[in-house]
Image (cartoon, grey):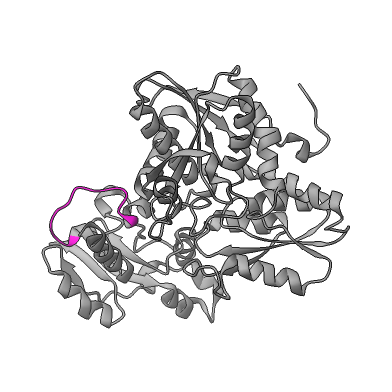
């Protein structure tokens, strides 16, 4: 086995696996595991390529500052390479990026500036415009500009493409890729156009992006919104050559997330939501074929960056991507049903220290106090603070000594309108069936319920 002297030497040469647990019609589907790159994604390739190209051209000097706009994994790849090469890195990131990615970036040493994800090109808070503006204001800085940097597609034309060609024994019929910056599909398209022009480049595009419609009609599609990170665009990136793409498939957020989760269950591969988009599109392409074909797509990044979203059942339920059995009453609004062992609670004889630790662990500010299945009180951060602010040893006091025991409950048979006066008094709705505690309903639970109703309507 090879021993590397630097983590950057481990970028590329990722493994290929055939997946057999999905219905692929007459085709065979292969996944190139780009999550095996040291930074956990395919973007490690372009990060190294773009920084080394800037070094060769003299665009970046030792000790300089790299600046980039990224909505996905390019920032993580740049952070990995910049740290190893001794550059400062500033990243401008739309606010829909997962917390795991942001924490990862900051842990490596990148400086993160969050900006709005609901504005487009030309707006002063649009992430690409902001990054370019910052590069003009900071001395000895270089705007990486993955969307217009020719070293981006070159990384795939000279690296990823030849690897696929070799791994597949020079036998590939179609490659399915997405567009974030457009580097992957452009670089691969250029490579396969040279070695085998019959290889079909297929676009996987999130529902809401304008690109699939452009491939199909030549016109920019209506712009929507989507939750999948890192792919899909509201414009055609400068570096993209979409003339190389022969067909396109649109994939909903729901299908992307559920396909990714199924990949983990069936194949043991922990993939991110953009990978779910690609695999869902590849499966649709495979099932559309009438002849056997070998199809390649990617696990673009690791799902460990999405544990709080895609792999969090409660987040998936809040978004409407998973469904529980419906009761037709207020039980349908409870995000964490007690009957499912999903609610976070304490007992009257638990200590205040244990209660505070549980609040911090689950990132909540109040907890119901249960005696058996009966709710006997509510305790929040203020209750704990008043109990211990003079004597810290009071942390060992029992919950019953500090909780609010006068509580207002609502029957699960009540109406949604009955929740409004409870919320107006800054209370949380404690839902019961007789004396039995069923769960809590918060303002955000009601908002999520109403939003799901609008989406389904």
Question: From which residue to which does the magenta span run?
Answer: 319-330
Out of 268 and 397, give the one closest to the viewer.
268
Is residue 443 a member of the stretch shown in magenta? no
Q: Position of residue 121 (x, y in %)?
A: 54, 68
Q: Residue at x 29, y 70 (%)?
A: 377
Q: Position of residue 351 (x, y in %)?
A: 44, 63
Horizontal relation, residue 337 to residue 124: left or right:
left
Is residue 328 a member of the stretch shown in magenta? yes
Out of 324 and 22, give the one closest to the viewer.
22
Out of 260 and 211, give the one closest to the viewer.
211
Question: Is there any visible trace of residue 383 in the rendered image?
Answer: yes
- Total labels: the figure holds 0
Corner quadrant of residue 75: bottom right
Q: Residue at x 57, y 53 (%)?
A: 72
Q: Position of residue 152 (x, y in %)?
A: 68, 46
Q: Residue at x 75, y 48 (%)?
A: 81
Out of 195 and 115, give the one closest to the viewer.
195
Corner quadrant of residue 122: bottom right
Horizontal relation, residue 454 to residue 112: left or right:
left
User: Which is the main secondary structure of the residues drawn in magenta?
Assistant: loop
């Amino acid at each position: 086995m090879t021993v590397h002297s630097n983590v950057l030497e481990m970028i590329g040469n990722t493994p290929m696996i055939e997946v057999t647990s999905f219905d692929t019609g007459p085709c065979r589907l292969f996944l190139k595991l780009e999550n095996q790159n040291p930074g956990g994604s395919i973007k490690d390739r372009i990060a190294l390529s773009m920084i080394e190209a800037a070094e060769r051209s003299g665009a970046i000097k030792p000790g300089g500052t790299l600046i980039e706009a990224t909505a996905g994994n390019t920032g993580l790849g740049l952070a990995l390479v910049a740290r190893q090469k001794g550059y400062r890195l500033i990243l401008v990131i739309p606010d829909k990026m997962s917390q795991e990615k942001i924490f990862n970036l900051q842990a490596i040493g990148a400086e993160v500036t969050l900006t709005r994800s609901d504005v487009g090109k030309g707006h002063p808070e649009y992430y690409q415009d902001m990054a370019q503006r910052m590069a003009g204001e900071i001395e000895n800085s270089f705007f990486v500009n993955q969307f217009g940097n020719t070293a981006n597609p070159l990384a795939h034309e000279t690296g990823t493409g030849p690897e696929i060609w070799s791994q597949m024994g020079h036998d590939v019929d179609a490659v399915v890729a997405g567009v974030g910056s457009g580097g992957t599909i452009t670089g691969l398209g250029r490579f396969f156009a040279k070695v085998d022009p019959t290889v079909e480049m297929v676009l996987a595009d999130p529902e809401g992006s304008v690109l699939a419609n452009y491939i199909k009609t030549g016109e920019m599609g209506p712009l929507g919104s989507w939750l999948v990170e890192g792919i899909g665009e509201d414009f055609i990136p400068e570096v993209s050559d979409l003339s190389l793409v022969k067909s396109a498939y649109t994939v909903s957020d729901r299908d992307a997330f559920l396909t990714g989760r199924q990949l983990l269950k069936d194949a043991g591969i922990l993939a991110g939501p953009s990978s779910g988009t690609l695999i869902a599109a590849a499966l649709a392409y495979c099932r559309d074929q009438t002849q056997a074909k070998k199809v390649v797509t990617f696990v673009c990044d690791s799902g460990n960056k999405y544990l709080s979203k895609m792999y969090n059942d409660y987040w998936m339920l809040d978004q409407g991507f998973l469904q529980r059995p419906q009761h037709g009453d207020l039980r349908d609004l409870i995000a964490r049903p007690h009957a499912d062992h999903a609610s976070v609670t304490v007992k009257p004889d638990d200590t205040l220290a244990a209660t505070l630790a549980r609040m911090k662990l689950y990132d909540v500010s109040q907890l119901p106090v249960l005696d058996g299945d009966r709710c006997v009180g509510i305790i929040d951060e203020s209750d704990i603070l008043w109990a211990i602010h003079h004597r810290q040893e009071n942390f060992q006091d029992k919950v019953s000594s500090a909780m609010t025991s006068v509580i207002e409950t609502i029957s699960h048979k009540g109406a949604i309108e009955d929740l409004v006066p409870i919320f107006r008094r800054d209370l949380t709705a404690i839902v019961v069936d007789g004396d039995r505690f069923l769960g809590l309903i918060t303002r955000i639970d009601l908002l999520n319920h109403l939003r799901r109703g609008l989406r389904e309507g």
